[in-house]
Amino acid sequence: MPRGQKSKLRAREKRRQARCEIQALKEAQATAAAAGESPSACALSGGRSAAVTPRRPQGAASSTSADAALSGTDSDEGARSQDEGSPRSSKGSEVSHRDPLNKKVVLLVQFLLQKYQKREPISKADMLKFAIKKYRHQFNEILKRASEHMELAFGLDLKEVDPIRHCYTLVNKLDLTDGSMHEDENMPKTGLLMIVLGVIFMKGNCAPEEEVWEVLNMMGVYAERKHFIYGEPKKVITQDLVQLQYLQYRQVADSDPPRFEFLWGQRAYAETSKMRVLEFLAKIHDTVPSAFPSWYEEALRDEEERARARAAARARTAAMASARARALASSFSHPK
Amino acid sequence: MTSNHTPAPSHTQGGPRRAGVMTDVHRRFLQLLMTHGVLEEWDVRRLQKHCYRVHDRTAAVEELEDFINNINSVLESLYIEIKKGATEDDGRPVYALVNLATTSVSKMASDFAENELDLFRKALELIIDSETGFASSTNILNLVDQLKGKKMRKKEAEQVLQKFVQNKWLIEKEGEFTLHSRAILEMEQYIRETYPDAVKICNICHSLLIQGQSCETCGIRMHLPCVAKYFQSNSEPRCPHCNDYWPHEIPEVFDPEKEREAGTSRATKRSLRSRQH
């Protein structure tokens, strides 16, 4: 008995999903290898029905009357996008201004830059909506090329922080990983964050606001004075960095008049570590991390914890992947 | 401490242009320039030096123009560039990282709601159509009923206008609004394409003109800094087009050295000027 339409469609969908998973897994492993994060689940774009009609979003991003050369040609090439969309190698290929993917890469880079400036997390949904649009099936390729540009030109690393909800963030390669952090008063914003994280760490993971300012003042950063690099330091540490979840800022219980304290935010735990912060502080004081024995111990314990967590996550993903593979294999050998 | 010397990927190579070499110095510079939106030249030089100090203390500081051209050659394939302009009132050189070939308000689009963007567009139109390059607050607010999107009250609109000023898209002067140099740098192309008949061009530099002086006989216009340069040490200024006597006061050419000498008084000047810029 020949297979019905429905079952054929389902099988095709499954095959496509499997292909996409393998590709996404490979790519994610490549990018996540250094970060030690578990590879992401399949980018669901491949699984979505191709019948969805791509529409230009009515949001603010496209409400201007003049259509740019970039978005204007979309409607012409949209129909052909499925065929032309084969990912091109970014190495060795000649400039192709007619390459439709290239335009999307450009749009995505510009979108990512905006997000970086506002220091907002980046969701895949937003990327698809504002930049990629019709080319959602080439999301991975476009993202890859855009990431390369971000790294090359701006020193920004696109990292997936939430593989389930597909949330990304841009990490400044020049600060956290650059060993040449300079103990100059003109430090970039992330330098400011590192100092505050350091103070918090040194005060037992919770620091009163006054003590934070004491340290910052020594480095020429004052609450009521505009700073050449940081702008308004008070706003940066009590609002901006809190909103971005790098810091927590809360009132000390039962304090009257109200006093405030700082703690590490969730994102700080995700993107850096006690050891890194200690390294940073040690560098500033021209010494080594082990010069601060009690903090060094704590940082070492933290490193061990993290290594254990990473290993556990890897094991879980490996188990999930093999379970999925087995399920697929069995569904092929038992046609419905 | 290694700087990452990475040549631009081959797919940026179009024709005879040499691909630039980006190091961490350039990347840091780009990051910082981006966060400022627009920056005056003396700040840009300080920024450049800071980036060298942080990433490559031993290297010689490249001449600013070459430094920027280097970066621009790498950014070319992304349709982004560091653009140099000048403030329209006193000719201070400014720099901004601009998107080319995209819709004009795209950089604003993520910061403002649909009705706010439309308010900006309305203000923009009034500014371009005006004789002086300024649109009065009253005239802008009167258009509040015509805005797309959510209904906006005049009180709200006043605050939105202030937001534009804070974000350096508009300048306010005595209740009137004109375009900030940032907006001119970012949106020149869009403005010329969208308002080809209403737009004014400077007779000297052929760039978009919002504020300037005009010849009362033949109507040609010039930016104030362009006037300053063109008529420098000319006791009998005449219109370059119709040769009639130029009736306006000739401003002084911007002198960065004089600025630096001003020293302490600069702090007060800057806070005053920050309303204008």
Image (cartoon, rainbow, N blue to C red):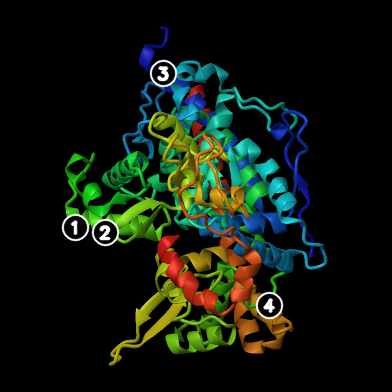
Q: Position of residue B46 (x, y in %)?
A: 65, 66
Residue corresponding to mark 1: B155
Residue corresponding to mark 4: A183
Q: Do the CB atoms of the residues marked 1 and 3 lie less than 8 Å apart?
A: no
Gap between marks 2 and 4 measured at Cα: 40 Å
Which circle, 3 or 2, is nearer the viewer?
2
In this view, the residue farthest toward the top is: A1
Do the residues at discs 2 and 1 belong to one chain? yes
Q: Do the CB atoms of the residues marked 2 and 1 lie less than 8 Å apart?
A: yes
Question: Which image quarter: residue A176?
Answer: bottom right
Instruction: Label 3, secondary structure: give it.
Output: helix
Instruction: Examine the rendering and report whether any part of residue A41 can be seen.
Output: no
Q: Position of residue A6 (x, y in %)?
A: 36, 16
Residue corresponding to mark 3: A9
Do the residues at discs 4 and 1 belong to one chain? no
Do the residues at discs 1 and 3 belong to one chain? no
Chain bearing tag 2 is B
At label 2, the amino acid type is: Gln
Judged left or right of residue B162, residue A158 is right
Q: Do the CB atoms of the residues marked 2 and 4 lie less than 8 Å apart?
A: no
User: Is residue A72 positioned above or below B151 on the image?
Assistant: above
Instruction: Label 2, secondary structure: give it.
Output: helix
Residue name at image x 78 percent, y 38 percent: B18
At label 1, the amino acid type is: Lys
